[in-house]
Structure formats: C-alpha cells, structure tokens
Image (cartoon, rainbow, N blue to C red):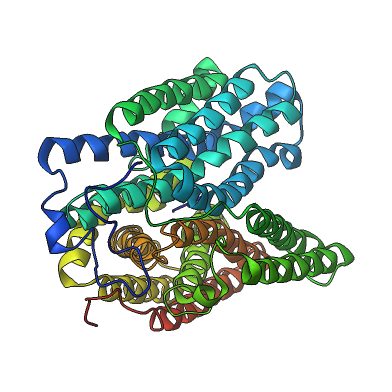
Amino acid sequence: MNIPNTAVEPQPAGPAAGTGVGTGTTGAGTAETADARPGGRAAALLITTLVLAVLSFQLNASMITPALPHIGSFFGETPEAVAQVQSMFFLAGAISGPVIGRWSDFIGRRTALLLVLSIMAAGTVLCIFAPSLPLLVAGRFMQGVSSAIFALSYIVLNEHLPARLFGTSIGIIAAINGGIGGVDGYFGGLMAETLGFQSIFVAVLVLAAIAAICVIKVVPKGRSTTAPGRMDWWGAGSLSVFLVFITYFVSAGSSAGWTSPSALGLLAGSIASFTAFWLIEKKRSTPLVAVHHLRSRQVWPVIATTILTLAGIFAIINFTVVLLSQDTKNGFGLTASISALLFLTPAALIGVFAAPLAGWIADRRGWIKTVRVGTATSLACAIAAALFADNQVAVLIAIASLGIFYNGFFLTAINGLSVLLSPKEAPAALPGINGAGFGIGASLGVVVVAPFAGQGTAAGYSAALWISVSITVLAFIASLFIAAPKGEKI
C-alpha cells in the first residue's frame, strides 16, 4: 500500500487452509485440497475480477490527488478544507478493513464484496453531483469503505486458488496497491484539467459497476464454514473509535504539537478506546480478534512490522524525497511533474512486475524469508538515500530499488502472511487489521519527519531520512518475531 500510500465468497472447494494459528498448512491449502481447486481459465477469471475490484479503490485514491486544487477552486474552499477529501477517504478505509473483513466470515466473501462496491458506488454518485464540499467529503468517506476490498481479495485467493498460484496472485493484487505503474495520477490530473474532476468519479463508477458484475458471475457463493457464531459489533465499534482517535491524534500532534491540549485529549481517547476494545474482546464468544491471538507471535509482529515499515519507507518515498527533489535552494530544484516522473513513477512501475515475482518466490522459498529480505533490503535502500542525500542519481537509484524490495517483496509478503497467520476461526481478522496498519503507519511516518524535512535545509532533509532509517530498523527487528506459518521452515 503505497497507500494514501492500504486490502471476498463462498466456500472453497475443501477446507480453507493456511488461515489459522495452529493449522498444519501454508499457501492456499493442503496437497489434498489444492488439486480440487480450479486453475487455468477459472483462476485467471477470479484474479482478473479481483483486480478490477481493487482498481476501483486504488484509482479513487490516486487519481483524485492531482485534482485536489481543481476541487478547491470549484467549491471556493481553502487547501486545508480540501484536504478532508483525502483524509476522510483513508480514515474510512482504516475502519472498514477490520470490520467488513471480519463480517465477511459470517456473511460470505461475495456478499461482502458486493456490499462494499455498492457503498462505494453510492458515495461516487454523491461525489459526482455534490453541490458543496461537505457533501463531497461525505461521498469520499463512503468511497473509502472500498479499502476492505484488498483484505477480502487476499482471503478469496487463499480459499479458492490452488496452492501453487497463491503467492503469484497475492503479488498481482499487491501490485495494484501502488497504482497503475504511476500513470494513474497523471491521467487524473489530465481529466480534471480537461473534463472536470467529476469525470474521474464517472470513470470510477463505470469500473465499479463492471467489477460488481464480474463478482456476481465469478466469485463463488456461500459462507465460510470456519467462522461459527455472530459478528462482534461491540468489538468492531470500539476498534473503529480507537482508529478515529489515533488518526486524529497523529494529525493534531503534527499540527498543534504532541503536548498540546488537543493532542493529549486525543491520546487519552485513544488509550481509553483501545482499553475498551481489549476488555470487550476478552468477553466475547466470537470476538473480532481474540486477545490471546493479539498477544501471539502470529499477530502482533505482523501488525508492528507493517506499521513501522510503512512509517519508515512511505515517509521517504512520498514526503521527504518529494520535498528534497523540488527544493531549488538545498535540493535538486526539479519541477513537480519531473520530480514525480523521476522519483515516483519508476518505483511504482517496477513494483507492478516485482510483486508477482515476489509472491512466486515466497511460495517456494518461504513467506518469512521473503518478508525479512524485503524489510532488510528496503532498509538498505533507505540507508543509501540518507548517506547520499545530496546526490540526485544516488537517491534516484535508491528510490527506484524500493520498487523491487518495498513495493514488490515487502508488500506482497506481509499481505500474504496476514492471510496465512490469521486465526483459523477468524480468517479475515488479521488481513483486515493489518490493512488498517498501512494507513496508520503511513500517516505516522510523515508527521514524525515533517518538522525536519519541512525546514527546507540540507540538515533537515538528512535528519528526516535518518529518522526513517531508524524506524525501518525497528521494523526489521519486529519482522524477526513473526512466527512462520505451519509447515514452513525458517
């Protein structure tokens, strides 16, 4: 998820495998069940359908970014007000992943996918005809619910594809998280300039309709047989409140100061809501995710690795280097378009090809090894960027290499592990919560380095890059605690 920049259905032909703590399988199933699952044309149709579904979310995220100035001009609003167009979109995504992902265990993956696409379509219609910015923001919040499509898609792939195709298919979906080779943002800006920003929403609506039709025709019906009981709405509500509090705490801390009354109040709310979530989960018979799983090495290290890696690497790619490359005094002095072409597009484009390859390797060499290689090599790229921050070519090479190791190896492997290590009685729990971690990590990384990179000095850029390096070191350490899926040797 180069995310902002973060995630299904019927029953598999045979028991869902690779989804449980304590199960004896990895990949998409046991040797016995793998052969019963469709390959060839059926598998290709399923993967294509899920690609269309995740694209409807990703284009909503990436194509709108360059159109934000046009939205502000259309409604006569300030940039600060227009920023809600994106912030509310990603906040909804952080909430929907854990909630709808877990709900799909009870209502079925296909039903959940269609529900998400319907909410997104309704929000898109509201965005097209919104007469004011507040209504547009409301539509964007509804669109953001589609972030759950990623987690749902990963689970569908695990439940319905042969084991030999699981890794590659996860890589294909993960590759979409970086956009369409970096060109989607360009076309978003072009459409906003020539046809108006509403044209972007029209294109997304058409894509969502096509995706919904394909889901109806391709994704199998049925409910998961591995998740008895009922949805834990109290746990879902308390977790959603926590995610809202923690998101606004990060925002308030970066703008008003970490010790400001508003930030401290939001921090208190974050602690209180998470405590409530923890206590609720201890008492539920079918919790959103059981407390003993949250404490296990199958769950917390995955979430910690995701948040820390996103905080470290996303801040480098999407913030510090962006400012450095456009700084005419202490940076490289590039225009915004040339900066994006050199420092954003290559990594996104490389990731499109590297992610499926990483999934193929993970299936054969091990998911734990792949995620650690991805984290370690991403760290090496971050160190190179920090050491040679004054050298445009060196920074360009370091950022482009992240297309292989971060967009490719890390994002694919961590998403695959979130499926393989999720508790067997709640197969969608960890993918959903891990998806929320993408947004939290990306936001946290930017606000931590912003005071330094925002100085616009060589020392400030260097400090921001080394802070990101330090965070990524912690991410690699966290990855060492991840337990391997059953049957996989480290």
Q: Is residue 259 above or below residue 117?
A: below
Image quadrant holding the C terminus, namely bottom left
User: Is residue 38 visible in the rendered structure shown here?
Assistant: yes
Judge from the rendering whether residue 458 lies leftward or rightward of residue 134; answer left or right. left
Q: Is residue 312 above or below residue 15?
A: below
Residue 264, image x and y in percent? Answer: 83, 69
Q: 196 or 334, which is in the foreground? A: 196
Q: Quadrant of residue 114?
A: top left
Q: Is residue 68 above or below residue 277?
A: above
Q: Say which residue appears at 58% left-offset and 52% top-offset.
A: 94
Q: Quadrant of residue 280?
A: bottom right
Residue 80, image x and y in percent? Answer: 74, 42
Residue 306, image x and y in percent? Answer: 47, 67
Tell how many labels.
Answer: 0
Q: Quadrant of residue 254?
A: bottom right
User: Is residue 452 visible in the rendered structure shown here?
Assistant: no
Judge from the rendering whether residue 174 lies leftward or rightward of residue 185; answer left or right. left
Judge from the rendering whether residue 369 lies leftward or rightward of residue 295; answer left or right. left
Judge from the rendering whether residue 100 lies leftward or rightward of residue 404; answer left or right. right
Q: Say which residue appears at 40% left-offset and 61% top-offset.
A: 392
Residue 145, image x and y in percent? Answer: 56, 40
Q: Say which residue appears at 73% left-offset and 57% top-offset.
A: 248
Q: Say which residue appears at 15% left-offset and 67% top-offset.
A: 364
